[in-house]
Image (cartoon, rainbow, N blue to C red):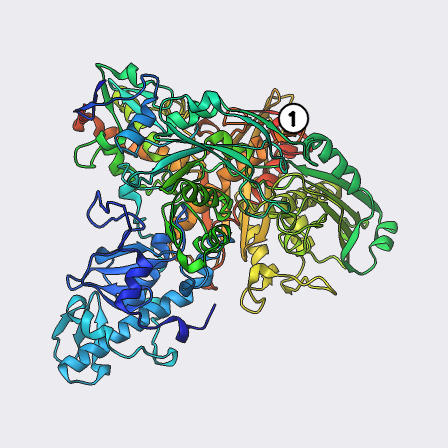
Amino acid sequence: MQLIINGATHETDVDEDMPLLWLLRDELQMTGTKFGCGRGLCGACTIHLDGRPVRACLTPASAARGKAVTTIEGLSKNSDHPLQQAWIKHNVPQCGYCQSGQLMSAAALLQDNPNPTDSEIDRAMTGNLCRCGTYPRIKAAIKSAGQFVNAAGGNEDA
Amino acid sequence: MPDSSKQIRNVSRRSFLKLTGLAAGGLVLGSALPGWQRPWASPTGGNSELNLFISIAPDDTVSIICHRSEMGQGIRTGLPQVVADELEADWQKVQVVQGLGDKRYGSQNTDGSRSIRRFYDTMRRMGASARTMLENAAAQQWQVPAGECKATSHRVVHTPTGRSFRFGELAAPAASQPVPGDKDLQLKGSDDFRYIGKPVNTVDTPAMVTGAADFGQDVSIDNMLIASIERAPVLGSSIKKLDDSAARKVRGVVAIERLDGGAEPPLFHPLSGVAVLATNTWTALKARRKLQIDWSDSDHLGHNSDAYLEKLQQRVREPGKTITDHGDVQKALASASRDHEAVYTVPYLAHATMEPPSATAMTTDSSCEIWACVQDPQSVQQHVGNALGLEPEQVRVNVTLLGGGFGRKSKPDFVIEAALLSRKMKRPVKVVWSREDDIRHDYYHAASAEYYRAGLDSDGRVTGWLQRAAFPSIGGTFSAGVDHPAGFELDLGFADLPFAVDNHRSETQQAEYHARIGWLRSVANIQNAFGRCSFADELAHAAGKPADRFLLELIGPDRLVDPSQGDYKYGNYGEPLEKFPLDTGRLKEVLRRTAARADLTLRGDQQSGNGEGWGIAVHRSFLSYVGIATRVRVQDNRLEIMEMHAVADVGLAVNPDRVKSQMEGSMIFGMSLALLGEIRMEDGAVSNSNFHDYQLLRMHQSPPLEVELVDSQEAPAGVGEPGVPPVAPSIANAVFAATGKRYRELPLKKHLSIG
């Protein structure tokens, strides 16, 4: 199976029903996409498929054929996506485990809507759990990043 | 803790490398970002070691060991910033290196909110010692008195002439300087602090926002197998019959192995189970579902958590075992003009760290190397060593970042699983716990019932206070026959009553264990503060007084309380009362500031549709004082938390931003358990399985939060846990203000829908 991940082509020989999560983590050693629940309940494995957020734990590898897969490792070329900068500015992460998924969900939101309201942020982010309780800082970081997103443009390596 | 003269010493280069793990077998050491390394990677070669925690490279890089585990509290930033400050290092040139498990560091058991309070003084002396050695080395180079040489901002300057050396230039000669004794160390004055007390940014954040940060689940070792384990659903049950023929046929399955559970008490033994070992996680998970296992009966098969809580509620209404008894409670209650009683319950709770437990092991006949997300690497050395018949020193433990800990990852059962499976397979094995494994096989926070009764005089003052607790003790996990709450659990917000009541008595009632019971963020303070702070609010209402005025009277005059009496010796979180007193003055100051953030006169009016109310709760735990004020709205039986405030006196805040973030996190952790958290057991097995039926607070339920830190120069106290206990009672008190209804049973979703 041939897949395009963060702009690079990968040949893999795995069962077609293997979720992208395990293909990324076990076969390609791209471990930024995290395993949290395996049921699409926590959002820790959020990636983009053709720019749309999906849960990698529920997406079979075969569903990505011919589509652009973007993971946290490909969110920006120089670790400088406006959200990544805002996350650092607001010192968002605590343990950090859920943050890849939070960032990927937030990036998809800002692509559609660079100036989301509180309730729009809630709607887009409610599928992403954080046990450490970084929600208020995530919300603040999304708001402060929003204004820079248009200028930065679509900087995914997709 | 050994004294510092034993702690501070030169270590040979060989031992430094051994401690920090340069030769990490089979691992490709890499760093995605300049200045950030995998936690278990060592500094590159050429460093000179000044003491156990500090080495300096010729290029000026200062490597500081963090020997405590990072699980979101920011300790990999907090402790090194203390060292760097005393060392006069430039933070931009500091690299944090995670220490291996090694008893020479002192305790590495990262729980109990202890890292800063136990190591603040030690880290300052480590930094000051290395600084002194650098100054002495410079003096020797220049042939001048040491008093003329002063370290400042990564250089040592000869004050009279202004000439200077970089730290990197002095590293080698400094390493051979004699280690100064304690009395030769000059600690900085707080006015000169460069980093202590400042919101230094977290060292791991850049790696966390790019996916480069490595957790236990992310470890990859050449030739490793992945294991997924089907464990006995009921404690004490074992494999009666196994049919693994279908699982073995799945492509990619390499082996299927049995794990024997230990006898009770449960300790840190792995549970009985069947491990599917495969070349990738997906295959292991898929094949595991094809296992056919008959499990043997167990004494715990009849355990039903609802019935158990009913039983505990009945028991706490009956006289129990007396722990402390002051004055004459019976007489006070009999002569009271008003008498009030209540029973509170909290269900079993699970840790549900975002990263499920995971451990990787490579076991040989004479050694074992571990890479894992563990809170206590020395406990791993000991218990893995026991399981394999090795000495602790033969077990090398590399600590990864922890995707949350909350107490779960100080139990090394999951690491022992990996070590045993690796020995059987003669190759590296990574054990991956699924979310279902995590929810169903935790060391649970105990289910509890607590009874409170108080008498009021005609002025609405409390004259007598009787309290009785029943919950399965953590002690039952480790010793046979423990069937009452233990003294160390009564220390946590129960028998340490800070109230000026002449007549009070604390009792316990029987509660036997039926599941592995463990410690969860703030431990028994969860149920003890829920009971105490809810009941005090009920009494305020009964006395017809605003909650803050009533509480100030109840706490009484400023004084230091020693709760010990007779056989009951108050533990005070392992610290002397002289250094960390139970100070009612500090509790009252936090209470006043908390009340100032609330409108305690607001009473919900359901008819007009404004079902809003404020509630407060204040509690001392882990030597810190925290108050929570909560505004709720209840409409059509739907509860919404509108805003929440924390006021915290934690003594000196080494990193105020991380203290605030811990308080924010504690409020959200506390809301999860107050509103949603409940583990249920039926026929001995946990009936929850994942985040749909063990719910955590989500962003849309998370209100605006504010944190106020009391400016303090008192000794630094606990931070990670003390924000949690007052959250649940502040919410229940607010709901009462809003609705007139008192809920004494958590979680509140049993009574209200959660907005």
Rendered view: B408 above or below A25: below
Indicate left or right for B589 with B416 as reference.
right
Indicate left or right for A58 with B333 as reference.
left
- In the image, residue B19 lies at what x, y percent? 33, 60
Mark 1, secondary structure of its residue: loop
Rendered view: B169 above or below B539: below
Residue count near mark 1 (Cα–Cα under 10 Å), binned few <14, some 14–19, many ≥20: some
- In the image, residue B516 lies at what x, y percent? 60, 42
Residue name at image x 44 percent, y 29 percent: B699
> What kind of residue is marked 1?
His
Indicate left or right for B27 with B547 as reference.
left
Residue name at image x 26 percent, y 64 percent: B55
Q: Which residue is mark 1?
A: B751
Q: Quadrant of the N terminus of chain A?
A: top left
Residue name at image x 38 percent, y 20 percent: A58
Residue name at image x 63 percent, y 64 percent: B559
